[in-house]
Image (cartoon, helix red, strand yellow):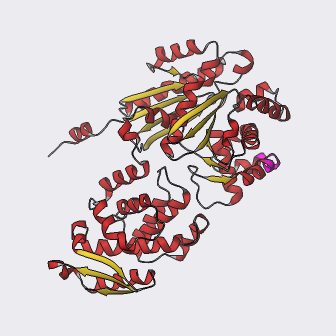
């Protein structure tokens, strides 16, 4: 029997990214690298290294002391977790400060961490790669707001194009405007006027990265009573965003602090809203799309082989979950071929594949709760490259695969996320998967000898050879329920 130590030695070692920003320092440790990295440790401290840099040109002694203390802890955590590769980067504050190089050298002496200071261009490109990692189809402009700087990058077709770094982060903007929000708008407008390609944003999407802008998303979610508290791919139409940003100054601090995930960012919210409002006003985007992927994920994505980069991150994550937690290794192509006659029109192929991979995710739960647990788990999975509407579709589909129908309470919880016809499509695909699992007993090879076909107003199932013994009463009932969802009748041949 293989020992636990030997088993651990066979596993990929964790990888870490240490991000020394102008406002915060964060260590994220991922289970391993790859197309769908899963964080197993994520800790942030607010040290405010960028405070005062715009006016003094130096990192504050107190902020550096805080940073050294917390970086020592992060070095210890990484060692304890057995991190195999650590990427450590510093951004605008360290880059702009006259004593930045001395700070980097002292970090190396105290902790052994090799801190690489990114140029403005490198920071912008790496953040944009992070957005493209989490949303390969992104087309528009990425905006990454840090404590001291704002990076804007034109992205599309999986590539980065024009880019610029501006000193418009909340800490820098406060100092440049003398603490006046009214004056800050003029400062931001003047800088943005020097970006000749910003008009390319018109009618496209603005992808938002950075803790302050994510805090704004949480405020908008709370005001809209949004049913899903997941920042990644949260989308706001431009007109609604302008209205929200106009109302923001009227909200009291006490009210904002009650919103989960906002309290520590309250003092900087209005300063973060100023550059966002100006980019929306000047660039005229179609909508705002918030991204949980940015600089840190871009650091990982940049180190992947080209073949791995081209993988679909949603399907990569679903495949890994299936390999670990499903009873059976689903043969996706075999199941897709069997499903083809009954696939709901307009159901995206990649979502069908994800549903096939995740269709057995709840087997270890109590039978009475499998459907409900699978629904909530899939709705809230830490995956990317998926819109909130698609999350709801997947969750409902796998719920039906276990339950045989859609429970009204669960449908009500995601109704706002769905488009017309989505619930019906999820019902049909879920019922087809339910029939397939029952037929094959988990062995998708059996499906090759049970052919589904729609002939006029009949859904027929034809059993070949010795597979006819699979056609029992339960199969007849489940075929009839599937045909009913299609508005036709069933027939077994």
Apparent side of residue 142 relative to residue 114 in the rendered image (left or right): right
The answer to whether residue 249 is magenta is: yes
Q: Quarter-wise, where is residue 489 in the image?
A: bottom left
Residue 463 visible in the snapshot: yes
> What residue sits 25% from the left and 81% below the top?
462
Q: Is residue 457 above or below residue 429?
A: below
* Magenta part of the chain: 246-253
Count of numbered badges drawn on the protein: 0
Horizontal and vertical percent position of residue 65: 59, 20
Of residues 58 and 185, which is closer to you in this image?
185
| Residue at (55% x, 36% y) in the render | 128
Residue 128 vertical placement versus 239 (above, below): above
Residue 14 belongs to the span the image colors magenta: no
Q: Could you tell me residue 166's position as x and y percent?
A: 68, 27
Q: Is residue 238 left or right of residue 182?
A: left
In front of the other: 459 or 179 = 459
Counting from the top left corner in percent of width and height, residue 327 is at 27, 62
Give the position of the C terminus as an image quadrant.
bottom left
Q: Nearer the viewer, residue 2 or 214?
A: 214
Q: Position of residue 4 (x, y in %)?
A: 23, 42
- Determine whether, in the image, residue 257 is placed left or right of residue 393: right
Residue drawn at x 69%, y 15% as measured from the top left: 57
Q: Main secondary structure of the magenta part?
A: helix
Q: Residue furthest front?
A: 456
In which quadrant of the rendered view does residue 274 lie? top right
Residue at position x 50%, y 54% in the image: 386
Residue 32 shows in this picture? no
Residue 69 horizontal side relative to residue 459, left or right: right
Residue 169, above or below 331? above
């Amino acid at each position: 029997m293989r020992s636990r130590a030997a088993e651990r030695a066979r596993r990929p070692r964790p990888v870490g990214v240490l991000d020394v920003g102008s406002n915060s320092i964060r260590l994220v440790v991922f289970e391993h690298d790859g197309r769908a990295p899963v964080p197993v440790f994520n800790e942030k401290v607010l040290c405010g290294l960028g405070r005062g840099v715009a006016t003094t040109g130096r990192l504050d002694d107190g902020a550096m002391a805080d940073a050294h203390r917390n970086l020592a802890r992060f070095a210890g955590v990484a060692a304890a977790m057995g991190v195999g590769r650590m990427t450590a980067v510093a951004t605008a504050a360290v880059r702009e400060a006259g004593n930045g190089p001395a700070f980097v050298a002292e970090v190396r002496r105290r902790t052994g961490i090799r801190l690489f200071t990114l140029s403005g261009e490198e920071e912008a490109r790496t953040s944009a790669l992070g957005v493209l990692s989490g949303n390969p189809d992104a087309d528009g402009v990425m905006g990454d707001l840090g404590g001291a700087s704002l990076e804007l990058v034109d992205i599309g077709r999986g590539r980065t194009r024009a880019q610029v770094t501006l000193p418009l982060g909340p800490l820098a903007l406060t100092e440049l405007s003398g603490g006046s929000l009214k004056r800050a708008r003029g400062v931001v407008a003047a800088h943005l006027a020097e970006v000749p390609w910003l008009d390319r944003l018109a009618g496209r999407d603005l992808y938002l990265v950075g803790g302050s802008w994510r805090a704004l998303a949480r405020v908008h979610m709370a005001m809209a009573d949004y049913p899903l508290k997941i920042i990644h791919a949260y989308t706001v139409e431009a007109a609604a965003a302008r209205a929200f940003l106009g109302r923001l100054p009227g909200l009291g601090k006490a009210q904002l602090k009650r919103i989960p995930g906002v309290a520590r960012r309250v003092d900087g919210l209005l300063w973060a809203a100023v550059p966002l409002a100006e980019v929306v006003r000047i660039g005229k985007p179609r909508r705002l799309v918030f991204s949980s992927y940015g600089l840190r994920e871009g650091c990982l994505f940049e180190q992947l082989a080209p073949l791995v980069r081209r993988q679909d991150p949603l399907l990569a994550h679903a495949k890994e979950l299936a390999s670990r937690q499903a009873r059976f290794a689903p043969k996706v192509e075999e199941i897709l071929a069997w499903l083809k006659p009954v696939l709901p029109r307009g159901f995206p192929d990649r979502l069908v594949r994800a549903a096939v991979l995740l269709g057995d995710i709840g087997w270890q739960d109590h039978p009475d709760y499998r459907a409900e647990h699978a629904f909530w788990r899939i709705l809230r999975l830490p995956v990317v490259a998926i819109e909130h509407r698609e999350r709801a579709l997947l969750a409902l589909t796998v719920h039906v695969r276990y339950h045989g129908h859609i429970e009204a309470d669960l449908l009500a919880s995601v109704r706002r996320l769905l488009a017309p016809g989505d619930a019906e499509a999820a019902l049909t695909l879920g019922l087809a998967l339910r029939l397939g699992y029952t037929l094959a007993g988990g062995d998708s090879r059996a499906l090759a000898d049970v052919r589904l076909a729609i002939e006029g107003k009949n859904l027929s199932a034809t059993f070949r050879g010795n597979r006819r013994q699979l056609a029992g009463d339960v199969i007849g009932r489940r075929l009839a329920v599937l045909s009913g969802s299609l508005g036709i009748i069933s027939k077994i041949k």
